[in-house]
Image (cartoon, grey):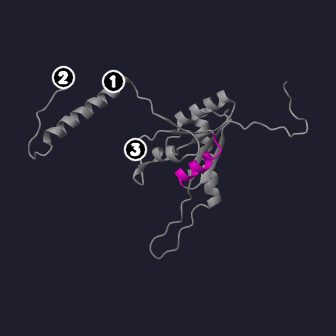
Amino acid sequence: MSVGPDPTEPETVPPTFTVVVGVSPTSRSPLALVWAEEEARIRGGHVVAVRAWRPVPPTYTGNRPPMLGEQPASALAQERARLAEDVDGVLGPAHQVECRLVEGGRRRVLLREAVGADLLVLDAPRRPQLSGGVYFAHRLVYSAPCPVVIMAHPHKDDRSRQGLGRKVADELVRAAGTAGRPGIRPPRLSGDDL
């Protein structure tokens, strides 16, 4: 025997699937934004684009008082507009992404915004960035309150990866040939000799 909903109970609305995307001010995180928007569309959820922001303190030199630059409210409005422009530039103007500029350090902001989210999505750093001796993305993976998706940058083609592998191999051979033997150099190798 099946029982229908109790008419005296308030109707509960299921929570919406939420994807939080960390948007870099330098790269605009295109892979993360595109993937997050598609994932939210498939799951019937929504995307929140987050960027950490810190106001620039007034500067001064010597005995002069600090130079008064932009007012904090004006700088905040400009950064909000910049975030919206960056998201529009990646997804187009018809997107339904909520944009949030949050004051604070990027790691703390992303962790705070990920509370209650179903996924946290980031583009992989273009270069390893050390933060206190540990990689930024690595620290997020282990401290986020939800699953973290890190979008790897695609390689241009297989030849570029092989070229990089060849360069690394050449450097390893060169380093091994000189290790512990100052003044001794390995023979020059052409690309066909390896």
The range drawn in magenta is: 105-117
Identify the residue shown where x is 56% and y is 51%.
52
Q: Are marks 3 and 2 in contact (CB under 8 Å)?
A: no
Type of residue at label 3?
Pro
**Which is nearer the eye, 145 or 100?**
145
Identify the residue shown where x is 53% and y is 70%.
66
Categorize mark 2 by other alpha carbons within 10 Å: few (<14), some (14-19), many (20+).
few
Q: Does the stretch in magenta take in 112?
A: yes
Residue 68 location, quadrant: bottom right
Residue 49 location, quadrant: top right
**Could you tell me how far apart the alpha carbons at marks 2 and 1 are, in whole angstroms?**
16 Å
- Give the residue pinned by disc 1: 159
Q: Is residue 156 left or right of residue 55?
A: left
- Give the residue pinned by disc 3: 128
- Give the residue pinned by disc 2: 192
Residue furthest out toward the right = 8
Type of residue at label 2?
Asp
Q: In this view, does 135 lie to the left or right of 167?
A: right
